[in-house]
Amino acid sequence: MPRESKAAKRERAARIFALLEKEHPGARTALDHRDPFQLAVATVLSAQCTDERVNMVTPELFRRYPDPAALAEASQEDLERVIHSTGFFRNKAKNLIGMANAVQRDHKGELPRTLDALVMLPGIGRKTANVILGNAFGIDEGIVVDTHVKRLAGRMGFTRETTPEKVEVDLMEVFPQERWTPLSHLLIFHGRGPCPARKPRCQECVVAHLCPSSTV
């Protein structure tokens, strides 16, 4: 693709967003939750684990530990048993108990609503914080960059970067802030559909005519 001006890239980004929004109207987080705290717990569990597996584990987890106060009192051993199938269960259990204690101690039992405060909690990095802010509080502080988002951002010509942090910066340059949260969901849905890692099905893609990597 010829060198693209910033204005042209933003215009193309807007067209891609509109088409993906129409193609994936139900795009949202796949993690089941009822409140911000449950979303935080589920997101921590989702590291190196499928959303489907997390959703199989969280009903029992939330039945036993429905809020930060209950989870803060959990024993490491009992929590490990409940979340064992999500992988890396020892570290996840340690982080979840630490997070619950920090929320109780420092935030009066309520999950904080700022990026700076969230990333201070055990087990929560920038990506997890962006998931919580965007999906639980409706705050577009940043863009969640997982493997799907990173892959599609590169294929669509929005970035040449390879680290999530730098990909996020490039995406924030071309998409308006109010679209940052839904953008992640749309790219994830599209990445799980016609644009997988191994062999993208460009002939099925609604944005193929706008994608520099298209084979059609």
Image (spheres, rainbow, N blue to C red):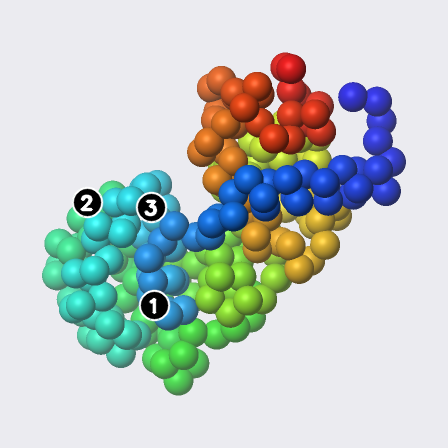
| x and y percentages locating residue 137 in the rendered image | 51, 69
Residue that mark 1 sits on: 34
Q: Earlier in the sequence, mark 3 or mark 1?
A: 1
Kind of residue sitting beneath label 1: Arg
Please tell me whether mark 1 sits on a helix, a strand or a loop. loop
Q: Mark 2 and 3 residues: CB-CB less than 8 Å, in contact?
A: no
For the residues labelled 3 and 1, the Cα–Cα distance comes to: 16 Å
Q: Nearer the viewer, residue 211 or 174?
A: 211
Q: Nearer the viewer, residue 159 or 72?
A: 159
Please tell me whether mark 2 sits on a helix, a strand or a loop. helix
Kind of residue sitting beneath label 2: Ser
Q: Earlier in the sequence, mark 2 or mark 3?
A: 3
Kind of residue sitting beneath label 3: Asp
Label 2 CA crowd tier, 10 Å (few <14, some 14–19, many 20+) = some
Eyeballing the image, is 132 above or below 26? Answer: below
Find residue 85 and name its label.
2
Q: Quick check: 173 left or right of 145?
A: right
For the residues labelled 2 and 1, the Cα–Cα distance comes to: 22 Å
